Amino acid sequence: MIKFIAAALWIVAVTLGSVFYSFQAAANLPATEEQMPLLGGLDYVKTDVISVPLLKGERVHGYFLTRLVYTVEPKEVGKLSVPMASLLVDQVYSYLYGNPQIDFTEYEKLDLDGFRNGIRDAINARVGSKLIHEVMVEQIDFLTPDDVRDNAVRQRESAAAAAEAEAAKPAEAGPAKAH
């Protein structure tokens, strides 16, 4: 019985020692370049919804809507002389208008990785340093002019229905007068 207890204590001690050693060894490893964007030390910049009208000829063929999240070096952001949000929105517009081969109407041909990497590389080239590490898509939509028109009609109809319902409510009676 004592042998079993001693063996169990030995196994527990060896297990705890190996776990402790592995955590210590992992903490002392330098992070590789590929791991850096997912680790601490970077700031996350979340954009508002960016709406870009897509023009072909003289017609609007739709509206590209996106909300992006960028991982950036805080030290590099401090060096910028323009607001970060303005730079990001301008670069999304420039990238979309500069790459007419991007067609959001054909979802099966959409290269999302190419879009994210293209935005990142374009911003880094414009700034002249590795400002942006990763671009993550939080939301991406494409609305045709018909979609926008239908949505506007639905909003007007629901507002009109709400106004009619409000007008149809009987006026609440005030307190009765005592005689």
Image (cartoon, helix red, strand yellow):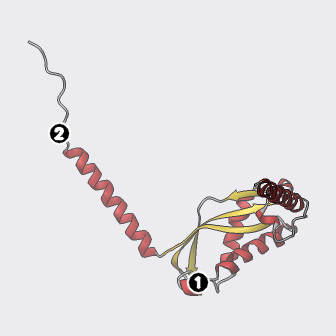
In the depicted view, which residue is nearer to us: 135 or 144?
A: 135
Query: Around disc 1, counting alpha carbons within 10 Å, would you say few (fewer than 14), some (14 to 19), or many (20 or more)?
Result: some
The residue that label 1 is drawn on is: 103
Coordinates of residue 120 in the picture (x, y in percent): 76, 71
Coordinates of residue 128 in the picture (x, y in percent): 87, 69
Q: Which mark is residue 3?
A: none
Report the quarter where the C terminus lies: top left
Which picture quadrant has residue 68?
A: bottom right
The residue sitting at 19% across, 26% down in the picture is 174
SS at mark 1? loop
In the depicted view, which residue is nearer to us: 117 or 59?
A: 117
Residue 78 appearing in the image: yes
Q: CA distance from mark 2 to mark 1?
A: 54 Å
The residue sitting at 51% across, 76% down in the picture is 62
Q: Are marks 2 and 1 in contact (CB under 8 Å)?
A: no
The residue sitting at 79% across, 67% down in the picture is 133
Of callouts 2 and 1, the N-terminal one: 1
Coordinates of residue 173 in the picture (x, y in percent): 17, 29
Residue 81 appearing in the image: no
Query: Around disc 2, counting alpha carbons within 10 Å, would you say few (fewer than 14), some (14 to 19), or many (20 or more)?
Result: few
Which picture quadrant has residue 107?
A: bottom right
The residue that label 2 is drawn on is: 170
